[in-house]
Every structure is written in C-alpha cells, then in structure tokens.
C-alpha cells in the first residue's frame, strides 16, 4: 500500500476517533473542560481515567463521528484554547504524578481569524516548550491524521506510536503539491515524497512503534491497552529528570 | 565603520566568493515596490534597508543584521560549515538548494555565532530570507539548537532575528521535528535563568512562529512585519472572507498581546542594548 492509500485510510469516514480509543482502552474516563482563560475547545477532549490501576491524564484531538458532531468539534482542528486546555491538563498531571497519554488525529491546527488573534503560534510553542520539561511520562498515539504543528503540540513525548494506517506530515500532501508544484494533481507524488507513513517514520527514527490494524478494532484497543500499561509501568519507575532528559535526547538526535 | 562593514561582508568561503559583486551592486538601481521610486541600491543599504521615500522595510541580509548589532570585528560564526542536506531525496530539492545557495551566498537559512553587543557577550542568530524564505530545514534547527546549547553552557543571552516562511516542506517530518528540538534547547536555556530576546522580522510564520519565535522572554517585532501561524491566503481560503488590512501585522499582534514592542529598525540596536544591560543583574538576587 502506498503513502496515498494510507492517507485515504487515515481520513476515511467511520474510522474510530479519539473518544472511541479513550472509552475502549480506559475505565471511568472523567472529562475535564476549559483552558481557564478563554473557553472550552471541543476539538480537544481531555480528562482523567484508569488504565487498570494507574490513573492517567488522557488528551485527544477529536474529529467527531456524525456530521453534527464533526461541526461541533471543528473536524478535530483545534484553536489556541484547545492547546491551552491540553497544556493545563498536562501540568495538572505533572502535579499529581500521573502519566499523560495523547491521542492525535487532526488535519492540523485551525487556520482562522480567531485562531490567529488568540495566538495559535504561541499556543503551540508553549506546548512544545512545556512538554519538553514535563516531569511525568508522556506517550502519544497517532490514530489517523497527524497534521503539522497542530499534531506536534500533543506529540513531544517519550514515545510516539502510530497505527498502521495513520500518517504524520509537516504539511498536507495537497498543500505540498499546490505550493511546491502549483499542481494539486501531484498530491499522490507529494504524499510519497513527504514520507508520511508509519513505516517511513519508524525508519527515520521519528516514532518508536507501529500498531497493526485489524478489521475488528477491539483487538487493536486490547493490544494498545496492554502495551500502554506495560510501557507506563516501566516509565513510571524512572526518575523524572531522566524522563525529561530522554525526551530531549529523543528529539535532539533528529536532523543534523 | 564602513571599512569594517566591508571586511565583514567579505566572503569567507568559496560558496560566498563565487558571487562577490559588491562594487557592481553599488551602481545598481533599485525600485522600491512600496512606492515605485527608483534609486541606487546603496541608498537603501545606507538607510538600514528602509526606503528613504516611503519607509517600506526591505528584508535585511542576515549577515548585515549581525554586523549591525555586533561590535566591530567581534562576531565569530559557529557551525559555518554546516549546510542543508537532501535527507529524504525529495524531488527537485537539490536544485532548489543550489539556487538558494547562489542567491543567498549562505549554506543554510540561518547564521549563528557569538559577539560582543555593547560590551556584553551574546549568542546571536539571524535567519536569511534569500535562502528559501528562511524556511526551517534540519540544519537550520540543528544550528539554532547548538547555539542555545552553547549559550546555556557559557551563560550567554541569546538574541535571535527570526524570519521564516515556516517549516521546509522538502525535508518533511524532519523539518517539523526541529520545532520540538529547538524548543527543548530554548527551554533549557530559559531554565538556566538566561535571557532570550526574539526579534521578529517580516515575515515570521508557520513552524517558526509556532516555536522559537514565540518563546522569547521578550519579543520585539519590526514595524509592519507579518507575524502569524497560518499565512493570510490560507486563512482567506478557510474563512472565505477578506481579512482586515492590518491583520497579522506587528502592531495588530502587539495589540492582541503576543509581542512586547513594535520597533523602528533604526532604534532596534538601542533598545537591544538597554534590555541586555538590564539583564546583567537581578537586584533582588542580592547583587546590590
């Protein structure tokens, strides 16, 4: 399967979204709202839940199921307040020594007037800096689309995992085709060249793990639950300064 | 002073040497696209790259930037030999890079180094618009990361002149990862109690805005600079409406609360000097 086919799968209607993963992997998810400054962005869901005997702060970019919900959730494209809510919950997790699990599924941070007025760039930058120093384990899982800075703002993690058909890209292949070649029909070529598939990213050292997809997604949830518990158990035993050091080293080695 | 400028601009390597046309450039005429007036290029150079007629801010070469802020002959470039690589074998990228090198006479979109600024040792970086519009490649990120690491190690403040179209598409995800990498280095520098002043130039957008451009303790922006995450055309397409005239301009972004001061380029050095001196000691730390 080529990069373009993975991209189509990642965007396919009916593909499970962040909330399905949260409900199937965790118990007693309690959703928490708001950035305590401006509002509550429904493109980001966050809260606390049990992973067996570990309380976990879970944060996801949620695209929504039916059309009405998709609109309410802005198709998973967050505004600055969404990233600030995510950061608030991460800081809260750090305070209470809870590990953080981020679920990424977004075409990108929202490009709009309000988003710019409220500092989209600043919100993402704040997350990158704060996540780099967060004294608790962070794992990010890409379940569908991972678009640019808007995805990275939830992916400065100790480990980044991807579902087999998920993609992670600096720009949408459509965007790259139209900017580089001024020709949107070159989207397929752009998708290949950008190296957006889980296999490519594993080879480039950008992610640690690929989770294979089954027709029956309940098997996928069960596998994630199991490896997540195992990994968090191991990471939670580490000294927090070591976790921060390892997170920095993970990104430090990329490019150069 | 003029003599020193010429020394500074003298090519340091073959790459730059191949394009030395400074005498020709002085006779060259230049048309300001702000007002349409035509005048010798040297006139605009003498005026800090501001149009003497309409005050339009032209993009300033990164090396000139550094020269203007550094005391005479104190600038020492770091990692000067590092150059952009076509890591993903992206179609057409090698050719783009060679054009960018010729056009900018630089090896990457950023120049880093250390210098004395008004008697204070500083780490400096400046991004070069002529190199793929200052886009962030892996080596751009690596050089800036190394600079912040150097500054942390040697307890130096950092002054960074940002200018960028954003991430460099031809380096795909590796470009995106630089945002996290540089942010990590800025974070460590900040944690060490050191000062970082970001100076945003026209334009500062995309992945650079969403990382180190917005991570300064103090953020300055040049008059009229376009500063944003998404570019105006993308926003217009998404919103299907015309944007207000001053939208994403430095003055607007300051009003919205994201930058500290909008500066006139001719006063920039003075403001930087003052700020750097004010950070030489705390006062409340028992130093008085």
Image (cartoon, coloured by chain):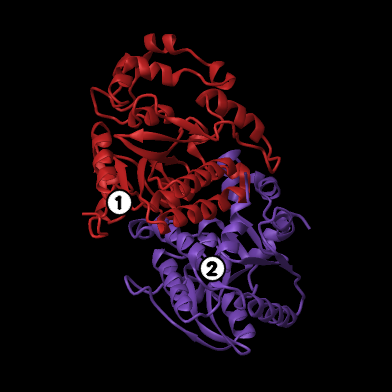
Chain colours: A purple, B red
Q: Is residue A176 left or right of residue B264?
A: right
Q: Chain of mark 1?
A: B
Residue A22 location, quadrant = bottom right
For the point 71% across and 40% down, the residue is B89
Viewer-closest of A67 and A149: A149
Q: Residue at 59% of width from left, 19% of height from top?
A: B14
* Image coordinates for residue B282, horizontal then vertical, percent: 26, 55
- Considering every residue shown, the one lying at the far left of the view is B288
Estimate the spatial distance between the alpha carbons at disc 1 and disc 2, rounded to whole Å: 32 Å
Residue B200 % position (x, y)? 36, 43
**In which quadrant is the C terminus of chain B drawn?**
bottom left
Q: Which residue is mark 1?
A: B259
The numbered disc on residue A241 is 2
Mark 2 belongs to chain:
A
Where does the image place residue A119, in percent across and percent down from the top left? 36, 58
- Residue A228 lies in what quarter of the image? bottom right
User: Can residue B245 be seen by looking at this rendering?
Assistant: no
Element under disc 2: helix
Q: Is residue A226 visible?
A: yes
- Name the image quarter holding the N terminus of chain B: top left
Q: Which mark is residue B272?
A: none
Q: Are marks 1 and 2 in contact (CB under 8 Å)?
A: no
Residue at the image position 67 percent from the left and 59 percent from the top: A7
Secondary-structure class at tag 1: loop
Q: Are marks 1 and 2 on the same chain?
A: no
Mark 1 vs mark 2: in front: 2
């Amino acid at each position: 399967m080529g990069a373009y086919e993975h991209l189509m799968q990642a965007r396919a209607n009916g593909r499970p979204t962040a909330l399905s993963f949260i409900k199937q992997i965790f118990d007693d998810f309690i959703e928490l709202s708001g950035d305590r400054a401006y509002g509550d962005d429904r493109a980001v869901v966050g809260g606390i839940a049990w992973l067996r005997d570990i309380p976990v702060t879970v944060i996801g970019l949620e695209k929504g199921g039916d059309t009405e919900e998709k609109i309410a959730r802005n198709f998973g494209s967050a505004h600055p307040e969404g990233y600030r809510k995510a950061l608030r919950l991460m800081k809260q997790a750090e305070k209470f020594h809870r590990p953080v699990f981020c679920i990424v599924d977004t075409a990108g941070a929202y490009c709009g007037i309000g988003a710019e007025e409220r500092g989209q760039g600043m919100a993402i930058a704040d997350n990158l800096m704060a996540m780099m120093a967060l004294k608790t384990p962070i794992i990010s899982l890409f379940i569908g689309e991972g678009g640019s800075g808007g995805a990275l703002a939830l992916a400065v993690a100790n480990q980044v995992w991807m579902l087999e058909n998920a993609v992670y890209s600096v720009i949408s292949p459509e965007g790259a085709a139209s900017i580089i070649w001024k020709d949107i029909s070159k989207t397929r070529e752009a998708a290949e060249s950008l190296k957006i598939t889980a296999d490519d990213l594993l080879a480039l050292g950008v992610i640690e793990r690929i989770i294979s997809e089954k027709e029956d997604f309940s098997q996928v949830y069960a596998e994630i639950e199991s490896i997540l518990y195992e990994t968090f158990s191991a990471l939670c035993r580490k000294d927090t300064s070591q976790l921060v050091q390892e997170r920095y080293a993970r990104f430090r080695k990329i490019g150069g | 002073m003029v003599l020193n400028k010429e020394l500074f601009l003298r090519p340091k390597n073959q790459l730059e040497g191949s394009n030395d046309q400074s005498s020709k450039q002085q006779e060259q005429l230049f048309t300001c696209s702000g007002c349409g007036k035509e005048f010798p290029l040297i006139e605009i150079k003498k005026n800090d790259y501001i149009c003497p007629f309409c005050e339009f801010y032209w993009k300033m070469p990164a090396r000139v930037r550094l020269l203007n802020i550094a005391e005479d002959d104190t600038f020492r470039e770091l990692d000067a030999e590092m150059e952009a690589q076509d890591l993903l074998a992206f179609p057409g990228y090698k050719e783009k890079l060679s054009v960018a090198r010729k056009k900018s006479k630089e090896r990457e979109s950023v120049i880093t180094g250390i210098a004395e600024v008004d008697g204070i040792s500083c780490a400096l970086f400046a991004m070069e618009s002529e190199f793929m519009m200052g886009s962030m490649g892996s080596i751009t990120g690596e050089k800036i990361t190394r600079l912040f690491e150097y500054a942390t190690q040697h307890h130096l403040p950092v002054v960074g002149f940002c200018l960028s179209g954003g991430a460099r598409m031809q380096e795909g995800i590796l470009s995106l990862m630089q945002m996290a990498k540089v942010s990590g280095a800025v974070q460590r520098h900040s944690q060490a109690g050191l000062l970082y002043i970001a100076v945003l130039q026209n334009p500062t957008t995309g992945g650079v805005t969403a990382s180190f451009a917005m991570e300064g303790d103090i953020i300055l922006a040049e008059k009229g600079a376009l500063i944003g995450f998404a570019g105006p055309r993308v926003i217009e397409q998404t919103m299907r409406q015309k944007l207000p005239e001053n939208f994403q301009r430095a003055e607007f972004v300051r009003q919205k609360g994201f930058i500290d001061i909008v500066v006139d380029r001719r006063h920039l050095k003075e403001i930087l000097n003052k700020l750097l001196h004010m950070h030489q000691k705390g006062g409340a730390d028992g130093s008085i």
